[in-house]
Amino acid sequence: MADVADLRLGVNVDHVATLRNARGGHHPDPVRAAHLAVAAGANGITAHLREDRRHINDDDIARLKADVAAPLNLEMAATDEMLGIALKTQPHAACLVPERRAERTTEGGLDAAGQVSRIRPLVGELTKAGVRVSLFIAAEAAQINAAVAIGAPCIEIHTGAWCEAVAAGRDGDAEAEWRRIVAATGLAHRLGLEVHAGHGLDFGTAERIAGIAAIVELNIGHFLIGQAVLFGLADAIKAMRAAMDRGRAKASP
């Protein structure tokens, strides 16, 4: 039986800022939400500083780094502006993600395979600065091999397609996506990459994916903030932690 303690939960507080920005002002505060998340069992805090600052802003990132003791995972586009902010902020980790202004959320994985020469020096600078880098990629061998070529120590597998198929009851599609995730995780693990997963996870899908022992971190945001609106953030995070632990208890080393 695997040790449940080796599965970390990163809570994304982006959509606390979305609620704040809908009306302006300072409430609800994503930094306050981060403190509550850590107290409830989160191992780290994730925040995506988008180019258009649609939710998290620069001040939020600075305060999350300064005021929250838990590790900060900065989701960022592979741009010179974001590199400069990351080097100045010095988060514990940076996850490179694709970004388009028109999208409502991150709709797919980063095309690492098509941008090796662009991403490699950026990853090198972050790594030299002591920032752990991950690439948010699809569960595809080409992208995983590119992560190795780029020199990123970690990947985060985009679980959105699987979660959408599960939610829609498309059992065949869901099983096909699940097999892709399992195969990709195995490949990445064999190649020496640390494997994370995220996007679209709820209690049920988090519990199932927690059973893959090679995955050591789940990053979950929108679902938890939605649950928090209905039931409270602490209870939502405790329930997610319990679901992950149930799944992890079934994992084989």
Image (tube, rainbow, N blue to C red):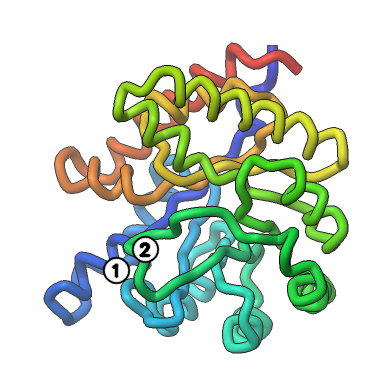
Residue at 55% x, 65% y is 98
Amino acid bearing label 2 = Asp
Residue at 75% x, 41% y is 141
- Residue 133 in the image: above or below residue 222: below
Marking on residue 114: none
- Tag 1's secondary structure? helix
Q: Is residue 242 visible?
A: no
For the residues marked 1 and 2, what is the alpha-carbon distance in whole angstroms? 5 Å
Residue designated by label 1: 17
Kindly indicate the quadrant of the structure image that contains residue 165: top left
Residue at 57% x, 73% y is 77
Is 54 or 85 nearer to us in this picture? 54
**Residue 111, x across and y down, in percent:** 65, 60
**Residue 65, x across and y down, in percent:** 53, 72
Amino acid bearing label 1 = Ala
Q: How crowded is mark 1: few (under 14 residues within 10 Å), some or many (20 or more)?
A: many
Kindly indicate the quadrant of the structure image that contains residue 55: bottom left
**Residue 25, x across and y down, in percent:** 17, 81
Report the quarter where the C terminus lies.
Answer: top right
Report the quarter where the N terminus lies.
Answer: top right
Is the residue under label 2 in contact with that under label 1 (CB below 8 Å)?
Answer: yes
**Residue 124, x across and y down, in percent:** 83, 73
- Residue 213 in the image: above or below residue 145: above
Q: Is residue 243 left or right of 226 when viewed as pictured?
A: right
Q: Can residue 16 be seen in this view?
A: yes
Kindly indicate the quadrant of the structure image that contains residue 115: bottom right
Q: Is residue 129 left or right of 53 when viewed as pictured?
A: right
Marking on residue 14: 2
- Tag 2's secondary structure? helix
Is 252 or 96 nearer to us in this picture? 96
